[in-house]
Amino acid sequence: MDIMKQVYKKPTSQGIIAHTAHLNLYDKYGSMAYGVILQIIPEPELAQAVLVDLFTSPQLKTLAEIPVHTPGELIRLARSKAIAAKPMCDASPLSAHKSNPNDSPEKLIFDLSFCQGYTLEAIAERLQLSPTNVLKSFYRYFKHLRSS
């Protein structure tokens, strides 16, 4: 009986508050985070596991305390967790990346950077562009998104 008492710990008031804060963040931003994760990992089961990992991670404590930067920080955290959880067999070399033929070069560069996690230098080297041109492509892509 003593073993059971040691294993089961009553939740503390701080633990309940943290859990409630995480649930509030999930209610507000869960669908946005899931969309980001699905862009990187198109497998729903794995994407859901990453989403659970995201909303149970200790990094959310700081997001709940400082709500001003929450959406951007949550997107960054979701992206990093999704890239880390992405299956290695899916992480093909940049030169073998398949894109939609209707995609603009700007969209391809954004996808390679945001969804696949390649650095600007790697993208520039593989696509034989200067880093400045890669950054200009980002600018044009964001400008296009804002005007749409």
Image (tube, rainbow, N blue to C red):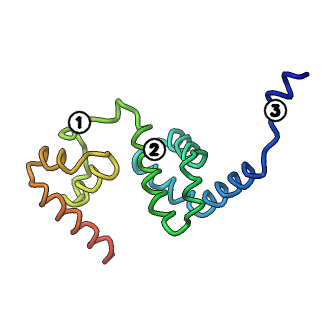
Disc 1 versus disc 3: nearer the observer: 3
Q: Earlier in the sequence, mark 2 or mark 3?
A: 3
Which label sits on residue 8? Answer: 3
Horizontal and vertical percent position of residue 41: 43, 44
The outermost residue toward the bottom is 147
Horizontal and vertical percent position of residue 35: 48, 55
Mark 3, other Cα within 10 Å: few <14 / some 14–19 / many ≥20: few
Give left or right: position of 114 versus 106: right
Badge 3 amino acid: Tyr
Compare residues 93 and 70 and report the one nearer the observer: 70
Q: Are marks 2 and 1 in contact (CB under 8 Å)?
A: no
Compare residues 60 and 50 and report the one nearer the observer: 60
Badge 1 amino acid: Pro
Q: Residue at x 50, y 55 (%)?
A: 33
Instruction: Look at the image and tell me in which quarter the C terminus lies.
Output: bottom left
The residue pinned by badge 2 equals 81
Q: Secondary structure at mark 2?
A: helix
Mark 1, other Cα within 10 Å: few <14 / some 14–19 / many ≥20: few
Q: Residue at x 26, y 45 (%)?
A: 118
